[in-house]
Each structure stands twice: as C-alpha cells, then as structure tokens.
Amino acid sequence: MTTLVTGCRGRIGSTLVSLLHRDGHAVRAASRTPEGLAATADALPAGVPVVACDLGDPATFGAALDGIDSVFLYADPSGIDAFLSAAETAGVSHIVLLSSSSVLAPDARENLIASSHHAVEQAAIASPLTTTLLRPGAFMSNAFQWVQPVRTHGSVDLPHPNSHSSPIHAGDIAEAALAALTEPRLQGAAYHLTGPESLTAAEQVGMLAAASGRPVTVNTVTGAAWKESMAAFMPGPIADALLAYAAGLDGVPDEVTSDVEKLTGHPARTFATWAEENAAAFRP
C-alpha cells in the first residue's frame, strides 16, 4: 500500500510524510514545486520519492497517482473533478481530505472561507472513493501573524480581543491523518478537529508573552483599521469574512471536541505547548 501526500511544502504534509515513513508505510511526497522540497524547514526523510502534483493542473495527476492506493489531499477545488477521476482510474481506494470546520456553518455554500472546502467535500463524497474528512478549525500557527508587531512594538492590534477559537496544533492534524490513512476502522467518517480548550485571542497573546519572557500589549482597534492594516496580505472580502467570524465568537466559547484523541489516542496539544515551541520567533 502506497500513500500519496499532497502539499508537502506545508507543515502538515511534510510531518505526515515523516510519520508514515517512520512507521514503515510506503509514501510518495507531492508538491506543485517538488524541486523546492529539499530546501524546506521540514526536510523529508531520505529515500522518500518526490513527484510533481499541481492540484490545479490535471496533466500532473497521472504520474503522481500511478501505483497509489490512498491519498492525503488538500481541498483545492480548481481541479477536483479531474483529480478524483484520475485517482479512480489509477486504482486509489481511499482519500483523506484536509477540509475545514468552516463547512459546518449554515452558510457554508456561500461563505468565502468555507465554500471551496465545501465544494471539494461534496465532490469527494459523490465519488466512488472512500473519503475520510478531517475538519480542523483555527490553526495554532495562525499566531505567526503576530510575530512582526510583537518583535517590533511589543504589541498586537486586535479588532475582537475577546473572540474565541479552539486552535489546533499542526502535529495533531498530521497524526490524525496518519491514523485515518492506516486504520481501516477510522475510515469513511468526518472528524471535527480542535485543540483542547477555547481561548480568546487576548489569552493566546498572553501565552505567547509568557513563553517568550516579555510583556505584550493588546490594543483594541476598529474592524476598519484592522482591515486596512491587512490590505497588503489578504483581499478585502476575505478580511470582511474573518471580521464577521470573529465578531460572532466575541465572548462566545468555541466548540471543543475529542476527535483528536479519538484518532490519535492522546489528548490534543495545548496552545501553551505551541507557544513554548515557537517562543524564539516572538523575541526581538
């Protein structure tokens, strides 16, 4: 049994490849730009085959899927129908899809954040392939967006400092994917993956301050000011969607599930753990 892991330039994909290789499973690493994989911070284990697979370019699918039995797939809707068709032709039997908990919202079809994940989920479910859905919420690594202001000014501007999330560690997502790929009893289901606690944005900043050993001030700003500060990094409609999401969870605890432990056998890692692991990034 050989698994194709897409998106190996990312933390989750590269970690999953290492876990599969560690446990003796045959694995093939895929990326839109495979020539750059060796230069990533999370270098792949020696001897793991690397192949080009651009989820928006069906011409890359045949070679990537040749001899593959299962796939870890990122939710890119651009070529999903062609990918699923190529996977079926190649003899793939199982797909683990990295989706998003945003699809659980009532407006998932129209929501700018959720719609692409929803479209890929629906296509995969409609295919003859067994599909396992991993639906993580906010990633702990989203906190890296605060590195520059913390290092430069010792402060973070937040439009909704009391907005909650239950952020998840990338390592837990990778371990959940490992379990779903290798344990038949876990396959064909949907899992809502969260961290172990609901935290406000301000609480997360406080944990980063404690881990890095320096005070960090939280400044409450207007949504318009935050959107303007993010204009160089994200389109306006996406910023508006994120602001609306944060406003909806202002003072409202986010859902916490036990699905990480159900899949991996251990409790989800805490944000405090992530902060300790990455404290150096937040120091001057």
Image (tube, rainbow, N blue to C red):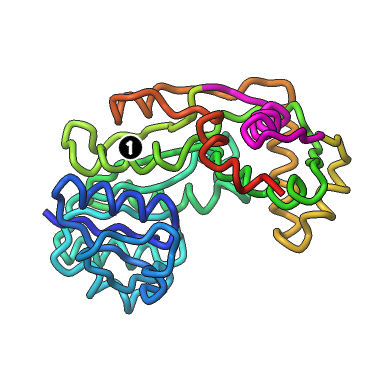
Range covered by the magenta-colored residues: 197-217
Residue at 77% in and 55% down: 230
- Relative placement, left or right, of 13 versus 283 is left
Q: Nearer the viewer, residue 51 or 14?
A: 14
Q: Position of residue 117 (x, y in %)?
A: 48, 49
Instruction: Check the image and name the residue furthest to the bottom.
Output: 59
Q: Position of residue 245 (x, y in %)?
A: 68, 37
Q: Position of residue 199 (x, y in %)?
A: 63, 25
* Location of residue 78 with respect to 263 vertically, above or below: below
Residue at 23% in and 37% down: 187
Residue tagged by mark 1?
176
Residue at 39% in and 60% down: 7
Q: Is residue 202 magenta?
A: yes
Q: Secondary structure at mark 1?
A: helix
Q: Residues within 10 Å of mark 1 (few under 14, many from 20)?
A: many
Q: Nearer the viewer, residue 39 or 121?
A: 39
- Relative placement, left or right, of 97 versus 166 is left
Three-letter amino acid code at the position of disc 1: Ala
- Does residue 249 appear in this view? no
Residue at 87% in and 47% down: 224
Q: Position of residue 105 (x, y in %)?
A: 56, 35
Q: Nearer the viewer, residue 185 or 19?
A: 19
* Location of residue 259 with respect to 59 vertically, above or below: above
- Does residue 43 appear in this view? yes
Query: How many numbered marks appear?
Result: 1
Q: Is residue 181 magenta?
A: no
Residue 257 occupies which quadrant of the picture? top left
